[in-house]
Amino acid sequence: MAHSLTPRDDILTRNYINIMQTFQVETTDKGQRLDKWLLTKLPGFSRSYLQKAVKSGAILVNDKTVAPHFFLKGDEIITADITAPIRPNVAPNTEVKFKIIDEAPDYIVLEKPANLAVHPAAGLNEPTLVDGLLAKYPEISNVGDDKLRPGIVQRLDKDVSGLMVVARTEAMFNHLKEQFKNHSIDKEYVALVHGVMTPIQEHGIIDKPVGRSAADGRRMAAQTDEHSIGQEAKTEYWVQERLRHHTLLRVKIHTGRTHQIRVHLNSLGFPLAGDKIYTNKRIKLAELGRIFLHANKLGFKDLQNQRQEYTSQLPEELDKFFKSLH
C-alpha cells in the first residue's frame, strides 16, 4: 500500500518540489517492467523521466539500484525520493487559436502560430496548443503515451510557426511515431539567418550531435569532439536568396532534436534572425517578437500508406519583415 505523496522540503524553486513515496509491489504485478509499472503508480510523470530517476538511484527496488527494464517479482518494496517538476494539467480551451489545414478521421494537419507552446512543461502556466486541440477534438485525450501531450508526435518551439500533424487515433499515433523514428517524415522550413553565406556554402549538411550545453544546462549545443554525449542530429540547407546582411534558407531536418536548426545554424556562425538564445552577442537582433523560422512543408504516409504532402506560406509578420530588407 502506497503512502500519500509527501513534500519533503516544500517547494524548492518555483518549478520543482522534492517528494517521497513508497510502494509495496503486489503478487499480481509479477512480470511487469519496472518503468511501465511506475507509470501507473506515479501519474503525471513521463516514462523517460521515470527511467532517468531509476537509473540515477532516485527510485530504488528493495533499497538497490536496478535497470528501468527490471522485471518485478511481485514482493518488492519500491521507494521514490525524487526532485520532480511541478507539471500543470491540460484542459480544453476554446480561446487557443490555430489554423486547421486538413482533417482526416485519423489525423489533423494544422498550422501553429508563433508564441504558442505545443504542450505544458514545468513552469509554463499558460494555455497551450494541446488545450486548444482538446476543445475541438476531445477524442485525442486518450491518444499517445502522455496525458499532457495527447496525440502529439512532434513539436515546434514556442516562437516557431508552421505545419504539424496530430494523431486522432492510437493506430495513427503509432504509425506516425514509427515514421519519425525511422526519419521517413519530410519536414522543411524557411529560415532567415544573420550573415551572408558564400557561394561555396550554397548547399550544406550539418552533421553534429546536439545535447545539453555543459556551460548552461538550459541551452542546447552542437558537439563535435569524440567524447560528445549529444544525440545524432543532421540538418540540410539550401541558399534561396542573399541579402545585404542576411541569407534566406530552405532547411530540411533529418532528425528532430530540441532546438536543432537553431543550434546547428548558429554553430556555423549564422544565427537565426530574432533568436535571443542562440546568437553571436555582436549581432544586433531584429525585433521580431519571435525567431524567423517557419515549418512550411510536411510529408508523411497515412494508414493506407498513401503519401500526404502539405505546404504553408510565410506568416504575415515574417513576410513583411523579409520584404523590408530588400
Image (cartoon, rainbow, N blue to C red):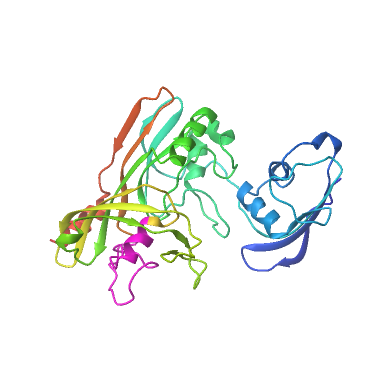
- Extreme residue toward the top, this view: 304
**Looking at the image, is 3 positioned above or below residue 306?**
below
Tell me where residue 8 appears, x and y as whole percent.
78, 64
Q: Quadrant of the N terminus?
A: top right
Is 49 left, or right, of 253 in this rendering?
Answer: right
Query: Would you say residue 112 is visible in this rendering?
Result: yes
Tell me where residue 247 appears, x and y as whole percent.
20, 60
Q: Residue at 55% of width from left, 56% of height from top?
A: 125
Choose between 42 and 196: the one closer to the eye: 196
Tell me where residue 127 appears, x and y as whole percent.
50, 50
Please report the bounds of the magenta region as a residue range: 261-289
Choose between 278 and 119: the one closer to the eye: 278
Q: Which secondary structure class fits the magenta region best?
A: loop
Tell me where residue 89 appears, x and y as whole percent.
61, 48
Quadrant of the rendered image containing residue 291: bottom left
Choose between 173 and 147: the one closer to the eye: 173
Query: Would you say residue 290 is visible in this rendering?
Result: no
Q: Does the magenta stretch include residue 268?
A: yes
Q: Quadrant of the C terminus?
A: bottom left
Q: Does the magenta stretch include residue 101?
A: no
Q: Residue at 39% of width from left, 59% of height from top?
A: 208
Q: Residue at 54% of width from left, 41% of height from top?
A: 92
